[in-house]
Image (cartoon, rainbow, N blue to C red):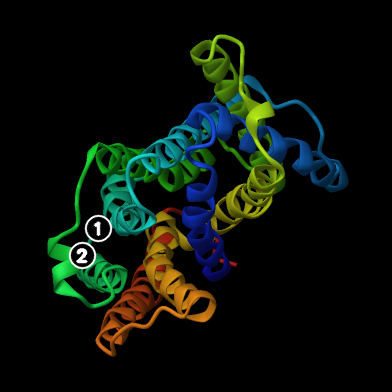
């Protein structure tokens, strides 16, 4: 999940590079199609290429629908907002996931969870604004931020639904199998929507070599790999613990800015980083194992 956080962190600046090139739906469709094609040899190697049953297909379709809406909202939002704003909003996902987990998969909310989430949210937002209260106060909220916030709410349903489907539908296929069919379902949804919106012209021919390079990166590293990581880790750690790793993302972006772009920040930023790490430790040590046992999910 730490590597998942690193990969997700890179998706914000990478997506911003191509967000305004063509329509967001067409761009997201290309991302999913490329990811599904590249992932198929991995599925073949796993030895399970059978078609899913109807209930499985519906479950994969639901997970795909969540992913499709989130990625579309990200690209669409970046047309009018900034990676800073989107990363700040993204830190709210663990708190929203906690509520979703309670209602969907009946994962327990207790005092330790709430304390950890409050600590993590404060720390992450403090890192996002680089310890500058003026930046926090002056954050300009626009329609793109509202859309991305809605996308984050929808994404918060992803991990609880994985647990619910495994429990109610006996969805015990491998993470590789689930990942592939989520990608295929997402590709179908997005292509249908994009073709309808763009009247048959997806606009992929308007992309340059750099654009395709970015899409390839997004497809492999921030779609295929991160999807597989969520399928693999959620049954082991529980949805709240899994999504708590989003608290690491602002710090990772800040480190990248310092290493590659020479951006400096004050010592107070380390306070925020310390809070986020404390939050994740609390959730892992005291909540993760309890919730996994509560859900009758084996811890490996």
- Residue drawn where x is 12% and y is 63% of the image: 137
Q: Is residue 96 above or below residue 270?
A: above
* Residue 201 seen from this side: yes
Residue 6 image point, x, y percent: 53, 67
Number of residues whose C-alpha sits closer than 10 Å to that of mark 2, classed few (under 14), some (14–19) or many (20 or more): some
In the rendering, which numbered label is found on residue 114? 2
Residue 232 image point, x, y percent: 60, 55
Residue 30 image point, x, y percent: 64, 33
Q: Secondary structure at mark 1?
A: loop
- Residue drawn where x is 39% and y is 58% of the image: 294
Q: Earlier in the sequence, mark 1 or mark 2?
A: 1
Q: How many marks?
A: 2
- Left/right of residue 22 with respect to residue 284 in the rendered view: right
- Residue drawn where x is 68% and y is 40% of the image: 208
- Quadrant where the C terminus lies? bottom right
In the rendering, which numbered label is found on residue 109? 1
Viewer-nearest residue: 268 or 292:
268
Residue 243: which quarter of the image?
bottom left
Residue 245: which quarter of the image?
bottom left
Q: Is residue 189 above or below residue 35?
A: above
Number of residues whose C-alpha sits closer than 10 Å to that of mark 1, classed few (under 14), some (14–19) or many (20 or more): some
Residue 134 image point, x, y percent: 14, 70
- Residue drawn where x is 20% and y is 70% of the image: 115
Q: Is residue 163 above or below residue 12?
A: above
* Residue 111 seen from this side: no
The reply to whether callout 1 and callout 2 are in contact (CB within 8 Å) is yes
Among all residues in the image, which is located at the extreme bottom? 267
Q: Secondary structure at mark 2?
A: helix
Residue 126: which quarter of the image?
bottom left
Viewer-nearest residue: 164 or 150:
150
Q: Is residue 217 above or below residue 249?
A: above
């Amino acid at each position: 999940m730490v590597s998942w956080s690193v990969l997700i962190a890179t998706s914000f600046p990478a997506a911003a590079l191509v967000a305004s090139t063509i329509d967001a739906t067409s761009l997201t469709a290309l991302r999913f199609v490329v990811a599904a094609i590249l992932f198929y040899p991995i599925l073949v190697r796993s030895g399970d290429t059978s078609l899913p049953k109807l209930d499985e297909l519906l479950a994969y379709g639901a997970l795909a629908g969540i992913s499709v809406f989130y990625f579309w909202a990200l690209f669409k939002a970046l047309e009018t907002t900034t990676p800073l704003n989107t990363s700040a909003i993204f830190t709210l996902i663990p708190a929203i996931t906690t509520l979703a987990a309670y209602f969907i998969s009946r994962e327990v909310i207790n005092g330790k969870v709430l304390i950890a989430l409050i600590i993590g949210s404060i720390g992450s937002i403090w890192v996002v604004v680089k310890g500058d209260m003026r930046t926090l106060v002056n954050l300009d909220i626009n329609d793109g931020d509202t859309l991305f916030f809605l996308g984050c709410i929808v994404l918060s349903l992803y991990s609880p639904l994985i647990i619910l489907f495994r429990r109610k539908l006996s969805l015990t296929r491998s993470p590789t199998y689930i990942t592939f069919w989520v990608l295929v379902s997402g590709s179908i949804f997005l292509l249908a929507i994009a073709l309808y919106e763009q009247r048959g012209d997806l606009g992929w021919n308007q992309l340059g070599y750099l654009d395709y390079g970015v899409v390839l990166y997004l497809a492999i590293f921030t779609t295929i790999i991160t999807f597989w990581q969520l399928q693999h880790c959620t049954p082991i750690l529980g949805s709240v613990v899994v999504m708590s790793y989003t608290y690491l993302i602002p710090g990772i972006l800040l480190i990248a800015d310092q290493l590659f772009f020479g951006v400096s920040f004050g010592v107070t930023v380390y306070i925020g980083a310390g809070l986020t790490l404390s939050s994740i430790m609390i959730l892992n040590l005291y909540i993760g194992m309890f919730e996994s046992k509560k859900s009758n999910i084996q811890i490996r």
